[in-house]
Image (spheres, helix red, strand yellow):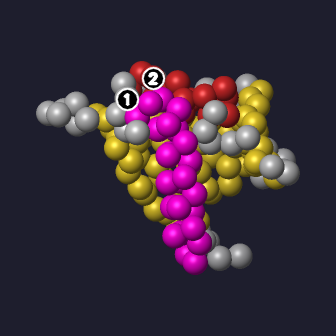
Amino acid sequence: MDSKIRYEIEFPINSSPQLLYQYISTPSGLQEWFADNVNSRGEFFTFIWNDSQEKARLASKKSGEKVKFKWVDESSKDTEYFFELHILVDELTKDVSLMVVDFADKEEVGEAKQLWENQISDLKHLIGSV
């Protein structure tokens, strides 16, 4: 299996960091824009899209700032892959943006970035940041 490559994309979002954090750190918030359904049991989150589902462990979080989910295998063991959502606030302008760190197969990075753009667009509509 080819290893995936890491990529980052940053999205300007017109929102308070506190509001944005609710949408990236809670199952109900994530369910509104990231996946069709999100369930959590302890530190494990199950993300459901149509008829597929992926399980991840909430590896770390810093209130109001970032969350990191590590994908796990069938036996709930961490894989080497994760995705991280990091809220950035410009010190001078106070502009808020969301940095996405994720992994994809080399030939699928463009497609993966497009998927994030669509999902972040949904998030922006949700919080009135369009």
Say whether residue 106 is visible: yes
Labels 1 and 2 touching (C-beta < 8 A): yes
- Distance from Cα at disc 1 to Cα at disc 2: 7 Å
| Amino acid beneath label 1 | Ser
Residue 16: percent from the left, percent from the top?
36, 25
Residue at (57% x, 63% y) in the render? 112
Residue drawn at x 50%, y 45% is 120
10 Å crowding of disc 2: few (<14), some (14-19), many (20+) = few
Q: Is residue 122 left or right of residue 41?
A: left
Query: Horizontally, is 98 left or right of 96 in the view?
Result: right
Q: Which residue is mark 1?
A: 15
Residue appearing at x 57%, y 57% in the figure: 115
Residue 68, quarter of picture: top right
Magenta region, main secondary structure: helix
Q: Quadrant of residue 80?
A: bottom right
Which portion, as a residue range, is magenta? 106-129
Q: Which residue is mark 2?
A: 19
Screen quadrant of the C terminus: top left
Residue 30 position (above or below residue 28): below
Looking at the picture, does residue 20 appear above or below residue 76? above
Task: Look at 43% across and 57% down and name the residue there.
Answer: 8
The foreground one among 95 and 39 is 95
From the top left corner, tell me how far across and down residue 59 is, in percent: 59, 38
Q: Is residue 86 magenta?
A: no
Element class at badge 2? helix
